[in-house]
Image (spheres, rainbow, N blue to C red):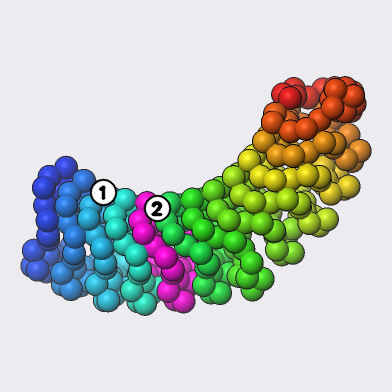
Amino acid sequence: MSRISLQNNQLKKLPKSIGKMKSLGILDVRNNKISKLPDSFCQLSIHRICFQNNNLTELPECFGELRYSGSMYSDFDLSNNNLSTLPKSFGDLDHLMYLNLSNNQLISLPDSFGNLMRLNKLDLSNNQLTTLPKSFSKINYLKKLDLSNNNLTLSEPTIKFRASEELKLDNNQIEKLPDWFSKISVQSLSIKNNKLSQLPESFGNQTSYLYYLYLTDNQLTSLPESFGSRFVRLRSLYLDNNQLTTLPDAMSKLNGKLNYLNLKGNKFSEKEKSRIRRMLNKCKIDF
């Protein structure tokens, strides 16, 4: 297996003969000016490509024909390009474990995307996605999923996703969390800077593994009465820059477990602040 490293040059294209390199396992052409790939590229058997920081506007329709070179994992980094769509064949890359498509111009994903069921880490941040394909719910082994800085609303009840370690949904257009969201089991959940005015009563039903919860910069006016009673492992909670005036009594169950609570930028009275301090007297609180 061989490796080609041509990063940090002024390359604008790859030669058509690249498809003849049958032993190529790693191709690193990051930080160039490549705008298009030859169809012969699809003949490669490869496990890692580094294409970040180029000028790619499209991928060849045959892109999904890339074969797996037999390494322990496969890692494709296509971040910081100008991709607006992916070919239908993209979902045929069912050997992928790590995929970075952040900082592109993606407006949608192909229906075949859900066939990438071996994905362990997926970064789709900083695109223009408004929805996800229904097949997305088939990707069940994700540990880290970053969907931040898109235009997602989560209004489609049939489109589900999960991540066991980290899920980021910051800077989207989410006004309401779907019912299925309460079944997500994740260690770190971030939904900062959205348009949430309330959380479903079921929020937290399956979050016994949650350690970090970020709800900063939303429009929350209240929390469910049961909020906090289910977060048996929660260590840090960020509720800053909302419109909260009180916290539910059930949050007293977090005392001695929660290490840090950020309540800055809300509308608590001095009386309520004193109550919260007594209720969570073992926790560091910022008002």
- Figure check: 231 above or below 54: above
Q: Which stretch did the figure color magenta?
A: 93-119
- Asked whether 276 or 68 is in front, the reply is 276
Residue corresponding to mark 1: 53
Instruction: Please tell me whether residue 89 is drawn above or below residue 161 in the rendered image.
Output: below
Residue 61 relative to residue 152: left or right: left
* Image location (x, y in percent) of residue 24: 19, 60
Residue 134, horizontal then vertical, whole percent = 56, 74
Q: Nearer the viewer, residue 228 or 44?
A: 228
Q: Could you tell me which residue is drawn at 35 percent across and 56 percent down?
A: 104
Q: Is residue 97 magenta?
A: yes
Magenta span: predominant SS is loop
The amino acid marked with disc number 1 is Asn
Q: Quadrant of the N terminus?
A: bottom left
Within-10-Å neighbours for mark 2: few <14, some 14–19, many 20+: many
Left or right: 13 in relation to 128: left
**Disc 2: which residue:** 102
The mark found on residue 70 in the picture is none
Quarter of the image for the C terminus: give it. top right
The residue under the point 44% across, 59% down is 128
Q: Secondary structure at mark 1?
A: loop
The image quadrant of residue 110 is: bottom left
Name the amino acid type tagged 2: Ser
